[in-house]
Amino acid sequence: MISSLDGIVEAVNASGAVINVGGVGFHVIATANTLAGLHVGQTGRVLTYLLVREDALTLFGFSSDDERSVFEALIGVSGIGARTALAILAVHSPDDLRGAVAAKNEAALTQVPGIGKKSAQRILLELDGKLGAPTVAASAHTGPSVIQAPDVLEALVNLGWQEKPASVALDEAIEAHPQASVPELLRAALQILGSNR
């Protein structure tokens, strides 16, 4: 099993990246939060999960072991595939998901595209007690600083968006979510950019 990749980032797009390790380019599918930390031409490292199917081998990449562990728990839920699990992690951080499961917050899960009421109920039921409690830090968002906003803009540009529309979307995201963390801002800006296409 391939558990991590460490190499030169050859390409980054909205859904994945190519990391060259020893002359072999590995395509990794990941959330925007993970992709934001990868920069073309620089060394990048991701933790991975290799999904083996009859017709394909697919690598999913994560910025932390916690994110990968939550992904593995999600794909253990009946009816939740790898892409849906990744979509959940694109909307909710691991700790946000822990909080939603602990609070039995069905509405939080139905915010994820492709997750309806029945799927949300199944996730809450099957993950109950399996993810642990959210950390204290997760419930105390400090909001983006002036220094962090350029990092979000750089991440959007690295994902292939033009700087001007990315900047406008980021401003909208900050205005709509003034207390959002950087990953939450990135997700909100991507949603704005996607809806403007």
Image (cartoon, rainbow, N blue to C red):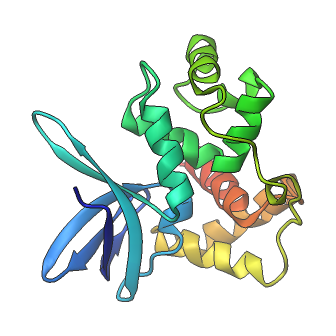
In the rendered view, tell whether residue 48 sits above or below residue 81. below
Closer to us: 115 or 100: 100
Image point (75%, 76%), residue name: 149
In the image, taking residue 6 as reference, residue 173 lies left or right, namely: right
Residue drawn at point x = 49 percent, y = 37 percent: 73
Q: Nearer the viewer, residue 30 or 5?
A: 5
How far across and down, in percent of the image, does residue 69 sit? 49, 48
**Residue 93 in view of the camera:** no
Horizontal and vertical percent for residue 58? 24, 48
In the image, is residue 125 above or below residue 39?
Answer: above
Question: Which one is nearer the viewer's eye here, 170 or 81?
Answer: 81
Residue depicted at x 63% and y 13%? 117
Examine the rendering and report whether any part of residue 149 can be seen: yes
**Up-down relation of residue 50 to residue 165 (above or below):** above
Question: On the rendered structure, is 40 left or right of 181?
Answer: left
Q: How many marks?
A: 0
Farthest residue, direction bottom = 42
Relative image position of residue 169 (x, y in whole percent) = 70, 61
Res. 10 image quadrant: bottom left
In the picture, residue 40 is in which quadrant? bottom left
Q: Quadrant of the N terminus?
A: bottom left
Q: Residue furthest top?
A: 118
Whether 27 is drawn above or below 71: the answer is below
Residue in view at x 18 percent, y 72 percent: 25
x and y percent of residue 185 in the render?
72, 60
Q: Is 13 on the left-hand or right-hand side of 5? A: right
